[in-house]
Each structure stands twice: as C-alpha cells, then as structure tokens.
Image (cartoon, helix red, strand yellow):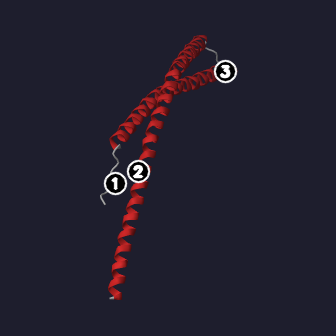
Amino acid sequence: MKRFQFKLQKLLDLREAKEKEIKNELMKVLSEQNRERNFQHELNEKIAEYEGKLSEMQKKGVFNPAEAMAILRFADVSRNAIVASEKRVQALEPEVQRIRERLVVASREKKVVEKLKERKLDEYNYELNREISKENDDMNQKIYHKKIM
C-alpha cells in the first residue's frame, strides 16, 4: 500500500500560513501597545522620582524656585504625554479586537482541515492494518497447509 498522502495538504498549508500571518499582524499591534505602555510607565517613574526630589528639597529647606518650576513643568508635560499615549493605546484596541476575531476565524478554518486530515489518516491506518492483517492471515494459512501436507 502506498504511503499516506493528504489531498488537501496545500489547503492546510495555506490556512496555516494565513493564521501565522494574522498572528504576526496581531503581535505587531500588541507590541506597539506595549511600547506605549512602557513609555507611560517610564514617564510615571520619572515623575515620581523628580517629585520625590522636589519634596526632599522642600523638607531639607533647600528650595530652588527655578528647579521646582522645571520639575513641575516636566511633570505636567509628562502627564499630558501619558494621556496622549493612553489615547493611542485605546485607539489601537478596536484594531486588536478585529485582528483577534480574524485570528479566531482563521484558526477554526485551519482546525477543520486538520480534523479532516486526522480522519483521513485514521482511515488510512485502519486500511493499512487491515491489509497487513489479511497478508498475515494468508501467510499463516499457507504455512499451515504446508505443515499438513
């Protein structure tokens, strides 16, 4: 019996490639969101650091108005940048959802063909085992007849 060959293998390959392409697209958008979130986190840390320095200066009584104004301006500008960054993250969310929906559809389509391949392979293995069993029975029968004669 010839070896197993799935007739829809090219279709399965195409569906796997499509799923992989959509995954890459999703990863690109998610990495963009993560960059924005990292940017927000870094700015929050810097704001906390500079405001900590400002409060430390005030506690020690070493107060420089120009430096205090610079820190307050930096904090204000940074908070505005964080808000803008969060808006960009939120703007990407609908695109992420669309891509995820496409990924779910592509995964389902691929799984349908994979299940068909599994069934065909099971059928092939069943037929192969049946054929092997039949050959073994024939050989055993011949051996038995030779022993009798």
For the point 66% across and 20% down, the residue is 55
Tell me which numbered mark, 1 or 2, is placed earlier along the sequence.
Answer: 1
Q: Position of residue 13 (x, y in %)?
A: 35, 40
Name the secondary structure under disc 3.
Answer: helix
| Disc 2 to disc 3: CB gap under 8 Å | no
Tell me which numbered mark, 3 or 1, is placed earlier along the sequence.
Answer: 1
Q: Position of residue 149 (x, y in %)?
A: 32, 88
Residue annotated with mark 2: 120
Tell me which numbered mark, 2 or 3, is placed earlier along the sequence.
Answer: 3
| Disc 1 to disc 2: CB gap under 8 Å | yes
Residue ranking furthest to the right: 59
Residue annotated with mark 3: 55
Name the secondary structure under disc 2.
Answer: helix
| Quadrant in which the N terminus is drawn | bottom left
* Label number found at residue 4: 1
- Write down the quadrant of residue 21 in the picture: top left
Q: Position of residue 84 (x, y in %)?
A: 53, 15
Distance Cα–Cα, label 1 vs label 2: 9 Å
Front position among marks 3 and 1 = 1
Residue ranking furthest to the front: 149
Residue type, numbered disc 3: Ser
For the residue pair 44 and 14, the one nearer the viewer reads as 14
For the point 58% across and 26% down, the residue is 45
Residue type, numbered disc 2: Lys
Q: Position of residue 63 (x, y in %)?
A: 64, 15
Residue type, numbered disc 1: Phe
* Label number found at residue 82: none
Q: Is residue 115 above or below residue 31?
A: below
Front position among marks 2 and 3 = 2
